[in-house]
Amino acid sequence: MSSLTVRQSLAIVLSATFSLSPALAQNSSIEPIRPVAFVLQRPYMAVEVPPARLADSQRLGGLLKAGKLYLTAADAVALALENNIDIEVSRYSPISAIWRLNRAQAGGALPGVPSGSQQASSVASGQGVLGSQQAAGVGGGGGGAGGGGNGGNASISQVGPVTQNLDPTIKGSVGFSHRSVPQPNNVQSATPVLVQDSRFYNASIQQGFLTGGTATITYNQNYLKENSPTNVLNPSVAPRLQLSFQQNLLRGFGIAVNARNITVAKNNLKTTDLNFRTQVIATVVRTLNAYYALVASHEDLKSKQAAYDAAAQLLKDSKRQVEIGTMAGADLIKIEAQVATAQLNFVNTDTNLQQQELTLKSLLSRTGISDPLLAVARIVPLDRIVMPDKDEFPALPAMVETALANRADLAAQRANIVNSELSTLGTKSGVRPTIVAFGNATNAGLAGTGVQVPGLAPPNPYFVGGLGTALGQVFRRNFPSQSIGIFAQAPIGNRQAQSDLAIDQLQLRQTELSVAKDVKQIQVDVLNAVVSLQQARARYESAVKNRSLAEQLLKAEQRKFSLGASTPYEVIQQQRDLTTAQSNEVATLVAHSNARIRLDQTLGTILETNHISVADVLKGQMPPAK
């Protein structure tokens, strides 16, 4: 008994685990997972996006009982909003919009760092033999290239309407070199081959601003040791601290221009919500139409079954009359043909019903018919289409105003106009000439081990020392340098920028006209939806009367047939008319339901009518149906 109890408990636990696992997979978050690490390490670790949710929600399993799927309209809508793949795809859009905003707030790209080979071959101006030659404008064998000019050119190359990098950027480089430089003129170096061991350390931090400028603080340090007997500071160290800036004055100037991408990204957050709402509305409409179409098919199947039963009963009664001699045997052929026709109609209607079930299953499940239980399950709709006593809706102007205020697709188009206007700020700025103000302030230092060279004056004691001596010179600003300037560039004709601006503005005007057209179309759609609803009610009332008359005529004809005053053909004809009338009644009832749904969709109120919260849909877990 103890072993059996343990097995039963284990079976219960395992079954509960496997039944809950799809729900856990469905309800897990799809948002990217930020790394958990030290604050300085975190920005450089990859963000992990969870796998796609491919399992159906637990709600679907709870509605499957004994091979049948029992559904109310609210259950069908909830399943579609939880499991529909189109909805799941749309759930990623708001999340992507948040990350696009995060990307826009970081600004644009900055110039690249000069290559390491150039930096490794440079020495500070005035440092060592080659530095002295460079400072004096004398070229030696294999002289190094300075880095100041390259940095200035790289900064100017990035001016324009491209937003600066708004995240502070830290750069650093370290290099070591050993060089042997032949000296064709060894008067200064006093050696035919100049051998150098050098090290350099570079670090900088750069910050861009929405005004259209950048500021950079750079620290450079060069260490040099060489074999020249004429070098009075050997080894030596040369630090340098530089503050530089650049600011666009025309093209690319201003917060509005440089923040336009950020503003567009913020606006897109609202647009993605509106597009998601539009997707939800479309899914609700499709689901409700498919559900009520299935309900109508069930009702039609009942009428086809009743028609078959009536034909079969007529055949049975007719056979008795033939046996007793009150009916000719030839009349049975017509009745048998009617039975076959009624059976065929029943089979066709049932086939159509199964196809509609397949359509509805594809809306309600991500796995669809690949799930063997769902594939064989028949859908049993629990709700019926109810015709209200009357259709109540406000006056046409009030409905048009409601539609203009609630339609998510129209609101998204208006937001796109705002985005186009923001983007035009960039092309307007691009028409202007490029004028950039730039400048820098540099503090330099130089120190090293003093060497007494015979025949030369002793080294200046002010430069004798180590790194501390040189840094003291830097921070005391003993050797300051400043520069300021303006860079200007203006393309002759400027046809490219003017064409870009004209094209953007023309596209903006086209978008504005399209929105105006859609506003006008909404007014027509509201009127058409109201007229369609009224016509659907009129057709339904007419169909109800026709069906009632057909029932009365059939009963009368059956009484006449039982008294011998009618023929089987006339009974069959009345039975066909009743079947047609019943099908027409069901069709007009569905048409009225679709017209009501269409009106709610046109007014933008279908979610409120069906008590659907977009926030619940976004989470992928709908509350229990009421």
Image (cartoon, helix red, strand yellow):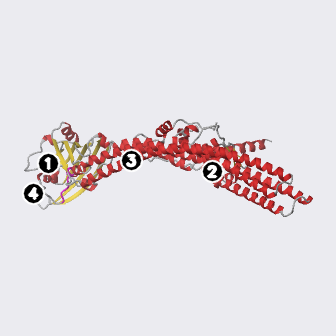
- Residue contact at pointers 1 and 3, CB within 8 angstroms: no
The residue tagged 4 is 187
The residue tagged 3 is 513
Residue at the extreme front: 565
- Residue contact at pointers 3 and 4, CB within 8 angstroms: no
Marked residue nearer the N-terminal end (1 or 3): 1
Residue 588 on image: x %, y %: 64, 47
| x 81%, y 57%: residue | 568
Q: Mark 3 or mark 4, which is nearer to you? A: 3
Q: Is residue 353 visible?
A: yes
Mark 4 residue element: loop
- Residue contact at pointers 1 and 4, CB within 8 angstroms: no
The residue tagged 2 is 360
**What segment is highlighted magenta in the picture?**
142-149
Q: Is residue 163 visible?
A: no
Predominant SS along the magenta part: loop
Three-letter residue code for mark 1: Val
Marked residue nearer the N-terminal end (1 or 2): 1
- Quadrant holding the N terminus: top right
Residue 367, magenta (yes or no): no
Marked residue nearer the N-terminal end (3 or 2): 2
How far apart marks 1 and 2 lie (CA) works out to: 91 Å
How far apart marks 1 and 3 lie (CA) works out to: 79 Å
The residue tagged 1 is 232
